[in-house]
Image: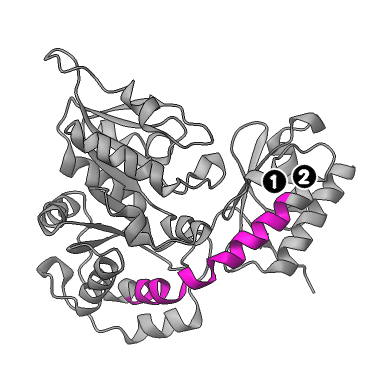
Amino acid sequence: MAESVIDLRSDTVTKPSPEMRRAMAEAEVGDDVFIEDPTVNRLQERASDIFRREAALFVPSGTMGNLTCILAQTRPGQEVICEEAGHIYNYEMASMSAVAGVLPRLVKGEDGILTWETISKAIRPKIYYRPQTALISLENTHNMAGGTVYPTKIAHEICDNAHDAGISVHLDGARIFNAATYLGEDVAEMTKKFDSIQFCLSKGLGAPVGSMIVGSRDFIERCRSIRKMLGGGMRQAGVLAAAGLVALDKGPNRLHVDHENAKFLANQLASTAGININAAKVQTNIVIFDVRDSGWSSGDVLKALEQRHVLAVPVDNHKIRMVTHLDVDRNDVERAAQTVKEVFQR
């Protein structure tokens, strides 16, 4: 029998569970552009309840969610402060500039985490011929920093100071439930000071499609119009929202398993000659390691791993990312770690 593939490329590769498939097949639907899909409406109500916000909006993707929030809070010619390795800058097709007409203002954070001290230096002075800072965007967890988590005190301090300066703050919380699991905190309390929040159903929570925006009622109504403009009116979307409801109900309670598997994987990689990784910094479900000391490129390593039925992705020419998720268990992670060791022993 052929050896199964262990897919650690992302937590987006998960397949919907049997429970999700049943919910999707049996979903009550209507036209969501008319705000008449009862399952979408339930999903939005559930998300707003969890985050203790007035309203929520279902969107097809995290990229659309982030862009929608940017469009709702900026004008062309303004700037958005974000961390230099952030997802909205590096992996969303420059949509903030191409579509929203705003300029990213990049700030480097230690392990991807910004502070008010570093942000404040990047805020533009109030001079009419300079582009003005309209929005600050934080990412929690920070994908390309290896799934690092914002301490809630730091996030709240940024929000408080930004609001004093008349600047809104957006949270790219694609994996915010991973952050909450790591901190042992409530997502509503962690995010209460942000003006807008986007989080993904299709990553660690396991749904096949979709993200959510949460905020005030007026803000969400503005986002509804923008979503339509961007092509996000999905009509009978209850078949997708049904899976999202299962993801919200079941997904957060098991994320600690992914974190434990990622920590195990990181410790195994740290003991492998030719790999550099600080396993102590692995907080959630993302493991990034450097292979330059092996003399191989990341592409060389990934090709060798794929031949042995283990999949991962390159970060750059020397770094590789592996992500644990609900479709890989401890046995899979152990096998993946052993496969990496065998490749590097060559």
On the image, the x and y values in percent for residue 153 come to 39, 45
On the image, the x and y values in percent for residue 155 come to 37, 43
For the residues marked 2 and 1, what is the alpha-carbon distance in whole angstroms?
6 Å
Query: Is-magenta flag for residue 162?
Result: no
Marks counted in the figure total: 2
Give me the residue at 29% from left, 63% from top. 51
Region in magenta: 242-266
On the image, the x and y values in percent for residue 88 come to 37, 39
The image quadrant that residue 134 belongs to is: top left
| Quadrant including the C terminus | top right
Residue type at tag 1: Ala
Q: Which residue is mark 1?
A: 279
Q: Which mark, residue 270? A: 2
On the image, the x and y values in percent for residue 142 come to 48, 44
| Quadrant including the N terminus | bottom right
Q: Secondary structure at mark 1?
A: helix
